[in-house]
Amino acid sequence: MCGIIGCISEGEAAKLGFEGLSRLEYRGYDSAGAALIQDGTINVLKDSGRIADIDNRLKISSHRSDIAIMHTRWATHGAPNRQNAHPHTDCGGRIAIVHNGIIENHAALRVVLESEGHVFQSETDSEVIAHLIEKFYSGGSGRTEPKPRGSLRAAMRKATALLEGAYAIAAICSGERCIVAARRGSPLVIGIGEGKTFVASDPAAFVGQAGKMVFLDDNEIAEITKGSYSITDAKDEVVEKVTETLSLTLEEVEKGGFKHFMLKEIFEQPEAIRNVLRGRISEAGIKISVADVLDAKRVIITACGTSWHSALIGKYLLEGIAGVPVEVDYASELRYRNPLIGPDDLIIAISQSGETADTLAAVREAKTRGARTLGIINVVGSTISREVGSGIYLHAGPEIGVASTKAFTAQVAALCLLALFIKHAKSGVVDRRIAEGLLGLPDKIAGVLEGSGGIEAVAREFASHRNFLYLGRGINFPVALEGALKLKEISYIHAEGYPAAEMKHGPIALIDRDMPVLFLATEDGSFSKILSNMEEVRARGGRIIAVANEPAPETLKRLAEHIIYVPKTIDELSPIINVVPLQLLAYHIANLKGLDIDKPRNLSKVVTVE
């Protein structure tokens, strides 16, 4: 949930670390700070607020240091203020740590540490880590002299053995020329460059500075020095890791002339869909490297947030195209309801980051019950991608904006590919109608994007409203949910998505001139029913916005105050087209309100806490 970076580089650790930290701000942005080793002592610089503003005040990036750890925070324990900002130090200021995750037994640990004389300065759960390391490093409350080099890693091992919950930790000590890092349940990756070494919660932090990377796995501890590293496991045995090439570029993690990352990523959707499809559809069939999917008696798709909405669409696709029974579960609920899962079930986990804590926990729960697992993931090398039995990478490129856009449409395209693959594998039939429809999607999405100016005009008229209702039927009901979520996330307008037929069972009581209602009214088998629902809203004075195909029938033109036209596609693929104007509508409303679109309040891009 938070962003971590550590850097070792002669004289430039603060500068390079701060550059990386700025790229991690999407992971948390209520406070930030750095701990630098300078002249054999630790200098902590931190404050509440946005990273750039903090640097203007504290000049973190201007400091000269060989070793630095930094953190940008999304608050879980304690208010977002300077006191609770990371890094946190031990009693003597000789050890500093940054932490991502939640320490579930922090309260009990704090009681013990305080009884031993440790003095706490914050309300956070994270500070117990610094004091635990201090305890095992110096054998007391921090009033004794540090031990010789090499004991920081040993102290980290003893400290993490007592922690319950999830963590990614980076620690430094004034007496040592290294960074020690540990992970369990939260991502950490080492970056290796020429004369400089990094550890971070995301490779984007060291893009352009490190060409190679190594991912830490759970319960591993790394000691990082200038130009090298060593990794040990829970038994303190050396672990040999595979070094991977970092393929991200600076262009991919920068805005590229767009005002916001979200807008850039909305406009990247044609290319993102091409990347999902590339090499996977041919005359011979559908090519996906997945295992153990064909013998499954039942499919359970699990996800959170936007990915859960794509999972709902996946249910329609897998049942309708492949004839496979599908259930959809919130990952946060699946593992806690004692699910009836076994070896005949296939669990599909969907996550943009591949690090979503609840989804990862659901995968692990399913594996303990013998189920097969498959991931639909965007980030290569992420934890979920390494833990599932097989998977489909989206290759949609990095998604920095907190409100997901291109990952959603890429996920739906991947689910459609999976449905086609299963159908082809079972029957030998390639559904050319759907395959050709998929190949035509990028151009149709580009057509919607060309009409962004018209959508902005609609946004201008409704930006001051406090409530919205989004309605859809069938496979487009989840699109209504996703459209409402986008508006909530970035504009702070209350919005609800609902099945259009269910409107009569409650939400119709809310309809008046102050409740705009957006209908997904593209032509499909339920189009006449949608028109009836629109009549019901119109009869009660509601203001209607419709997403429709051109030419729209006269009845729809009479009922809708505004019509946003989208290209016609086959019913199964309509969600991928129809969601794009909803993304743009939310974006333009938030932009007109002057909000911080890429960093909406209280939200974080990667949710690594349960």
Image (cartoon, rainbow, N blue to C red):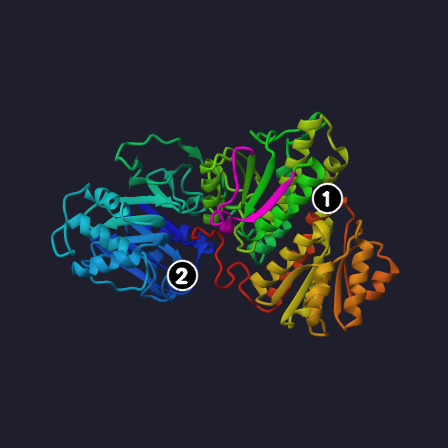
Of marks 2 and 1, the one in the foreground: 1
- Magenta residues, as a range? 325-344
Query: Quick check: marks 2 and 1 in contact, CB under 8 Å?
Result: no
Compared with residue 233, is residue 160 higher up or lower down, i.e. above or below?
A: below
Mark 1 secondary-structure assignment: helix
Residue 1: percent from the left, percent from the top?
43, 53
Q: Mark 2 — residue?
A: 75
Q: In the rendering, at what x and y percent does residue 528 appear? A: 83, 56
**Depth check: 156 or 503 in front?**
503
Which element type, helix, strand or loop, lies under badge 2?
loop
Nearer-the-camera pick, 27 or 8: 27
User: Is 279 one of the magenta-colored residues?
Assistant: no
Residue 357 placed where, x, y %?
A: 45, 48
Residue 331 appears in the picture as rendered: yes
Which residue does the numbered mark 1 point to in the structure image?
A: 572
**Identity of the residue drawn at 36% across and 50% down:** 165
**Amino acid type, label 2:** Ala
- The amino acid sitting under disc 1 is Glu
Q: Decide which of 492, 195 is in the foreground and name it.
A: 492
Q: How crowded is mark 1: few (under 14 residues within 10 Å), some or many (20 or more)?
A: many
Most foreground residue, 393 or 472:
472
